[in-house]
Each structure stands twice: as structure tokens, then as C-alpha cells.
Amino acid sequence: MNAHKIEFQDIVDIKNEDRPMGHLTPIEGDFDIPFEIRRIYYITRVPEHTIRGFHAHKELEQVLLCLNGAVKISVSDPFCKQVFVLDDPATGLYIGPGLWREMYDFSPAAVLLVLASQRYEEADYIRDYRTYCEYAYRLEKGDSNE
């Protein structure tokens, strides 16, 4: 499955031992991120018990980062499923094309940042799970025709 965590550099900014200044996490496109970033968006104020996502992308790649709080991300194909917890702003989750995703258990005040390889294009989405499974089975057999 083409989904995995990415650890970013986490620089603790300390002027002196008694006065920490916070953390700095630099992220550079085409270096830390395995694609050119074409779109950035974030998800906030998610009501309790809400599940988001319920789709896959044909071509789009994404890196998700929970900048505040925590969220669970379920990533699956018809053959296996993985659940990732994002609760460290210096850790991202890479999700490659062709994977079904669902985001849930957002903590209060969670901020989920998404870096995407393409601009929004509705034709790239698969929003019906049965259609997605048929698509994924065709890809597994090497049939890339839609």
C-alpha cells in the first residue's frame, strides 16, 4: 500500500536553557514532499463524531499533517487497511493515488493541513466505494482503462 508516515525536521528553538522559544518545522516541496505542491488546504472545526473523506483519487498524491490536536486516518484498498494517528505536527502522512481514505476522531481544535500534487479536479475523485473497488481491481490486473 502506497501510504506511509514522513518525519520532518523538528527544530527546538532555544535562546537559552531557561527560555524555550518553541518548535520550527521546515517543509520544502520536492525535497521533504515527494511531489510539487500545487494545492494547500486545511480542515478545522470538525464536529465531534464526524467522519470525512470517503473517496479515493486516481492521480492525486497528498501529504496530511495535523498541526494541532489529533486525527485518525484510515487508508485502504480492497485488499488491506491501515489506520494512522496524526498527533505530531512534525509528522506527515503520504497517501499515494488509488487509495480510499477516511478521516475521523478529530480532537477538539484539530487542524489538518493537506498538501496536494494537483489543483482540485472533480474528475480525479472516486466517491462511491463500489466503483472504487472495481477501479482498484482493474488496476491490480493491469487494466488502466476506465
Image (cartoon, grey):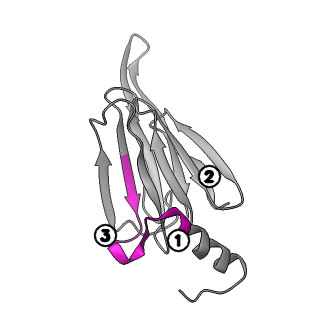
Of all residues shown, which one is farthest toward the top? 18
Depth check, front residue: 127 or 35: 127
Residue visible at 65% across and 78% down in the picture: 139
Q: Earlier in the sequence, mark 1 or mark 2?
A: 2
Q: Earlier in the sequence, mark 1 or mark 3?
A: 3
Residue span colored magenta: 113-131
Q: How far apart are the two marked residues, 1 and 2, measured between alpha carbons?
A: 24 Å
Q: Residues within 10 Å of mark 1 (few under 14, many from 20)?
A: few
Q: Is residue 61 above or below residue 85?
A: below
CB within 8 Å, label 1 to label 2: no
Give amino acid for label 3.
Answer: Tyr
Give amino acid for label 1.
Answer: Thr
> Mark on residue 4?
2
The residue where tag 3 is placed is: 120
Q: How far apart are the two marked residues, 2 and 3, measured between alpha carbons?
A: 23 Å
Q: Which is closer to the viewer, label 1 or label 3?
A: 1
Magenta-span inclusion, residue 31: no
Any part of residue 20 in sight: yes
Q: Is residue 138 above or below residue 60?
A: below
Residue 40 position within the rendered picture, expressed as x and y whole percent measured from the top left: 31, 58
Magenta-span inclusion, residue 126: yes
The residue where tag 1 is placed is: 131
